[in-house]
Amino acid sequence: MLRIALIALVAISLIFTWIIWFNPAHLEHRATSNVSVKTATQSTTKKSKDTVYLPVAIYQQKDGSKHRLINDTHSMSGLMRKAMKAARVNKAKTVKTLDADQYAALLKQDNTVQMVYSDKMSWHLFNKTFFTKGAKHLGGEFEFTRIVVNMRHETVTLVNDSTRATRRLTFTTGPDYGKIAKAVKSANHKYLVEETRMHGREVALYPDGLEVQPFAYLVDSQGANHFVALLMGNKSTSTVDSKQNGDQTIYTVNNNNQRLTADKNDGQMRFDNFTTDGPKKTRQGVLTDAYNQMMTLQPAGMEGVRFTHYDTDEMTVTFRTYVAGLALFNQTMSGTVAVTRTNSSLSIEFSGANLSVPVPTRETPVKLPSTSTVLANVRAKGFTNSQIEDVQAGYRWEKDDDSTLVIDLVPTYYVCIAGSYYDYSDIMSGDVTTTTVAAKTSTGVNSGKVNSSGALTTP
């Protein structure tokens, strides 16, 4: 009953939103039209970079085993930052590169808490966003993927899984290790993990499998007109042209120098600006710029959004939504924003549909198999170890059977094969095969799957 009442209340809110933003005479219903729009007021509730650029996983190594820590209601990485943000770094010490055995020993060092990024983080950006006060001696820029906090010896080391480079931090004001221990104890799920190396990075495997709670969320949906006003308007009145191309509506302004493409079937959108500056020169600059571009969408429900990948070849920074510590995947861009800046253009790929607030559900936890079982079954389908680049436990975005206003988050595994993530259940059902993956890889045809950067593959 509570679920129905909550859905009804939000439905009323969405109706009023629709009335405000949509007009039947507006763009989608005509092949070509001129529409005057005005810039929307800038939101005052932007999500802080401090949260977006937090690690995506927290591990505890203790008594010879490693566990991933999950809190159903609070971000574990947010709790860890809260415990550590008052510390002030003196400097990052000289780099020390470990061999494979030394590095494996570091990752298995007992009484450590390890905070892990899904891709390389900028030291300068981390220093600016993780701590209240920046380092006394900042030093040169470098990249890392993991923060290792040794609770016994009270040390903090930044490490790079790819290069096995390590840098010990020294402090003018040290972290409160008691607060860190308290944050660790707040986890209400601890999943046994073993890390293995895949394609130059450490991947978490779950030898005992894991029980994951399904969730249901009300979806916040915004139509193309909302983003036309945000992205293509200015202080004066702008004229926006639109035309229909199959299922897509294309909005243009300034002699086609700015373009928004919206798909009516899945709400996926892409904004392109062909009169823009080139990419920033540093990783900190690229990641900061990508965050600023994402925030031009004035996204609602930013809780849980994290930086997940920077593709240096495509110049694409990807942000993904995490729920209860696990990544949300979808066959469209829902829950994901991908920002690409080249020497000649800026593009933002996103969806008008994103998570709003959770709704009550009586679903029982889903038991996912061990990762070794998953990988063995994938190999049995003909995929080779060289093709399998990553495997993650996460959530699949599914439409609710009872309400169009609700999205169900279904626990599953996603396996990255030849650069794209595929739902494990689709591989097992035969919807994804070696033939379909090979065809997609050779032709580059959009299959509606998500690529290794976390963004949709595009033609």
Image: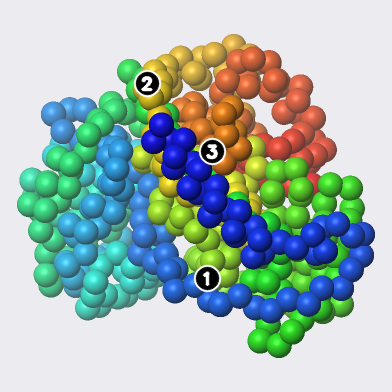
Residue visible at 46% across and 28% down in the picture: 411
In this rendering, does residue 233 appear at all?
A: yes
Residue visible at 64% across and 65% down in the picture: 20
Find residue 450 and name its label.
none
For label 1, the crowd category at 10 Å Cα-Cα, with few meaning under 14, some 14 to 19 and many 20 or more, is: some
Q: Tell me the SS state at disc 2.
A: loop
Find residue 364 and name its label.
2
Indicate which disc, 1 or 3, sits on the residue closer to the N terminus. Answer: 1
Indicate which disc, 2 or 1, sits on the residue closer to the N terminus. Answer: 1
Q: Position of residue 32 (x, y in %)?
A: 92, 65
- In the rendered image, the quadrant that contains the N terminus is top left
Q: Are marks 1 and 3 in contact (CB under 8 Å)?
A: no
Q: Position of residue 418 (x, y in %)?
A: 65, 34
Going by the numbered disc 1, the residue's amino acid type is: Asn
Q: CA distance from mark 1 to mark 3?
A: 29 Å
Residue visible at 54% across and 37% down in the picture: 407
**Which residue in the protein does label 1 denote?**
292
Q: CA distance from mark 3 to mark 2?
A: 18 Å
For label 3, the crowd category at 10 Å Cα-Cα, with few meaning under 14, some 14 to 19 and many 20 or more, is: many
Going by the numbered disc 3, the residue's amino acid type is: Val
Position of residue 309 in the picture relative to residue 273 (left or right): left
Quadrant housing residue 48: bottom left
**Which residue in the protein does label 3 denote?**
406
Q: Tell me the SS state at disc 3.
A: strand
